[in-house]
Image (cartoon, rainbow, N blue to C red):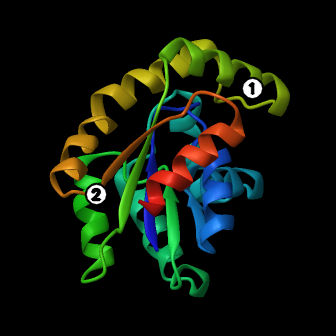
């Protein structure tokens, strides 16, 4: 199964991605995790990504596309995957389509959530995890960028018959059950 999970920052994509991957036996590929790993290791990619992440901006496509392409070529992704955080723009969709070739995505899952609720969630996460990229100002900027650049992808994937929208608010178990039902139908 080849899936993409979308939704605004703080909608629960990372949490739900783990549940989905466990249930369907596929690999979770999170660009956020890849960026943070590179940050922690102090790589050149990590330093480049940090500049953008700390400002609440997206990492440039050239960096992100290359990272995702390499990750999709890893052996564990061959049996199926869930992309989390990529693609975020129409240009990245075209790049992903080229990477996937004759075996496209099976479904695109969009978690929906109230803006003020996700701001609250991200502030809590910032305090718990000490994340420098989760200040109130940066969070609001990321939500603006999502609305401007990523939300239009829902129309594209809907036109392809791939989009499944699920309410991301509620307990983890409630949201997981809604997602599982939607992906199995």
Front position in the image: 114 or 150: 114
Q: Residues within 10 Å of mark 2 (few under 14, many from 20)?
A: some
Whole-percent x, y for residue 61 in the image = 36, 53
Compared across the picture, whether 30 is left or right of 36 comes to left
The vertical placement of 136 against 132, above or below, is: above
Q: Position of residue 37 (x, y in %)?
A: 70, 57
- Residue lying farthest to the right in this orientation: 128
Q: Residue at x 38, y 31 (%)?
A: 146
Residue 100's spot in the image, x, y percent?
A: 32, 76
Residue named by callout 1: 126
Tell me if residue 148 comes above or below residue 106 in the rendering. above
Which residue does the image show at 51% across and 77% down from the upper left? 80
Circle 1 residues within 10 Å: few <14, some 14–19, many ≥20: some
Q: Indicate which disc residue 162 carries.
A: 2
Which type of secondary structure does the marked residue at label 2 adopt? loop
Quadrant of the image containing the C terminus: bottom left
Distance from disc 2 to disc 1, alpha carbons, whole Å, reads 33 Å
* 139 is higher (above) or lower (below) than 88: above
């Amino acid at each position: 199964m080849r899936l993409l999970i979308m939704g605004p920052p703080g909608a629960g994509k990372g949490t739900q991605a783990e549940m989905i991957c466990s249930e369907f036996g596929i690999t979770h590929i999170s660009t956020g995790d890849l960026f943070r790993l590179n940050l922690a290791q102090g790589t050149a990619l990590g330093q480049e990504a940090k500049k953008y992440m700390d400002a609440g901006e997206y990492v440039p496509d050239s960096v992100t596309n290359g990272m995702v392409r390499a990750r999709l070529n890893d052996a564990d992704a061959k049996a199926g995957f869930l992309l989390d955080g990529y693609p975020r723009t129409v240009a990245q969709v075209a790049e992903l389509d080229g990477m996937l070739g004759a075996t496209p995505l099976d479904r695109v899952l969009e978690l929906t959530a109230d803006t003020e609720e996700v701001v609250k969630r991200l502030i809590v996460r910032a305090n718990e995890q000490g994340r420098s990229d989760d200040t109130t100002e940066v969070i609001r900027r990321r939500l603006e960028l999502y609305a401007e650049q990523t939300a239009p992808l829902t129309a594209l994937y809907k036109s392809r018959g791939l989009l499944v929208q699920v309410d991301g608010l509620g307990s983890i178990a409630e949201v997981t059950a809604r997602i599982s039902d939607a992906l199995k139908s």
